[in-house]
Image (cartoon, helix red, strand yellow):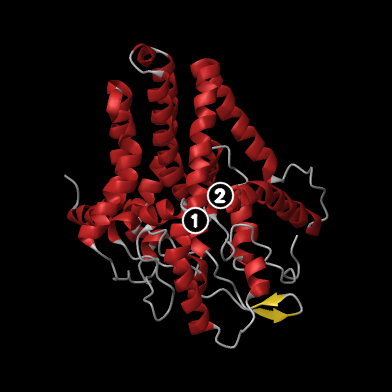
Amino acid sequence: MIPSDQVAKFRNAAPFWMSLILVPVAIFAALYGGWTVILLPVVTWYLFSILDAFLGLNLENADLETGEDQLSWYKAITIIWAPVQFALLFWMIWYVTGPGDAHLSPLETIVLFFGVGVITGTVGIVYSHELMHQKDRGERFLGDALLSMVLYSHFRSEHLRVHHPYVGTSRDAVTARYNEGFHRYFLRVLRESPISAFRSEKAMLARKGKHWSAPENPFWRYLGLQAFMLLLALLVGGWTGLLLFLWQAGAAIWQLELVNYVEHYALTRKHLGDGKYEHVKPHHSWNAAHKASNWLLINLQRHSDHHYKPDRRFPLLQNYDESEAPQLPYGYPIMTMAAMIPPVWRRVMNPRVREWRKTYYPEITDWAPYNKARLPMPRGSA
């Protein structure tokens, strides 16, 4: 019999396990084909948006004195997701290139694996983000494994060594500029982020007196894990399986960068002179308290607190109201869809950015340098 205290702990964490419903949805779509191949993006984007509308906001905050022993069921979902996603991804590749090839048309397979990319991006990368911030090596390895399944392993170096220290400055590629449309942003980030990530690791090794080619460079681990995933996709599904693996990886990366675009759009830290910037505060990230989408994204939308206190596990992230942090009008599913249409995005967000500037930085009258990200680089940047 399960102890009553464990039942209570699981009951509290259970909403964050809703991501697991995407696994049987994916299997059902692969087995039946036809219209069901669109279910994964429909459930992920639209179902959770509808749930947000009905369930509203979660403005409650967890007790920051909560011990690690009270978070076991919250940690468990992030830990088990890596093997679950690995099994699902390669089973899907095996099935559609083998038994399922007889009833799935090429178009159905392409749409289906776009949906797989929605899973590996919306859930997999978000969970890898939680895991990479932890001190436990096992958790960090699982985070690396999840990123290797979408060929975006450098995200760990870019996120920890560049994005967090330099968010809201010209050094951070993934801080979207004012009036920068997502499509232009996406191409820029794809070009700049891998270079920035590599330079950050090279600089870290140089400070230790080591060459970039030293075994400690995590890029060797990134390369090995990604090569393994590519080879496995080829062995399981042949050339078609490899192409499908690449397709879902591209969809996942697109999902990630849509979220990155939304999280910090046009929010910049004040330049203090001599290459220095103010410390990161809650008002340097867009906050969203929408209940259902925060279940799916393990509180990622409480992004203001994540950047303010990056070492907090997701169940302890705090919510901030409009007096402390800028608020998104909707959860990430709707906001990322809006970001795909730049005129709609600007109509929704630019007035909020202008209000944010008046609220937090009334003394700044010339925002042109911030808009174009031509401020001096922060000291010590790679």
The three-letter amino acid code for the residue at tag 1 is Pro
Q: Nearer the viewer, mark 2 or mark 1?
A: 1
Q: Which mark is residue 183?
A: 2
Pointers 2 and 1 in contact (CB under 8 A)?
Answer: yes
At a point 51% along the width and 31% down the height, the residue shown is 247
Residue 230 position, x and y percent, is: 58, 27
Q: Does label 2 or label 1 sit earlier along the sequence?
A: 2
Q: Report x, y in % for residue 234.
A: 55, 19
Locate residue 40: give its quadrant: top left
Tell me the quarter of the image containing the N terminus: top left
**Which residue occupies the extreme front position in the image?**
343
Residue at image point 37% right, 52% down:
333
Marks 2/1: CA–CA distance: 8 Å
Q: Nearer the viewer, residue 167 or 373?
A: 373
- The residue drawn where x is 60% and y is 33% is 226
Q: Residues within 10 Å of mark 2 (few under 14, many from 20)?
A: some
Residue under pointer 1: 342
Secondary element under disc 2, as helix, strand or loop, is: helix
Residue 329 in the image, given as x and y percentages of width and height: 36, 66
Q: Secondary structure at mark 1?
A: helix
Could you tell me if residue 143 is visible in this image?
Answer: yes
On the rendered structure, is 84 left or right of 4?
right
User: What residue appears at the point 36 percent right and 76 percent down from the top-left corner?
Assistant: 321
Say few, some or many: other residues with alpha carbon within 10 Å of mark 1 (under 14 / 14 to 19 / 20 or more): some
Q: Amino acid at mark 2?
A: His
22 versus 133 height, above or below: above
- In the image, 309 versus 44, the foreground residue is 44
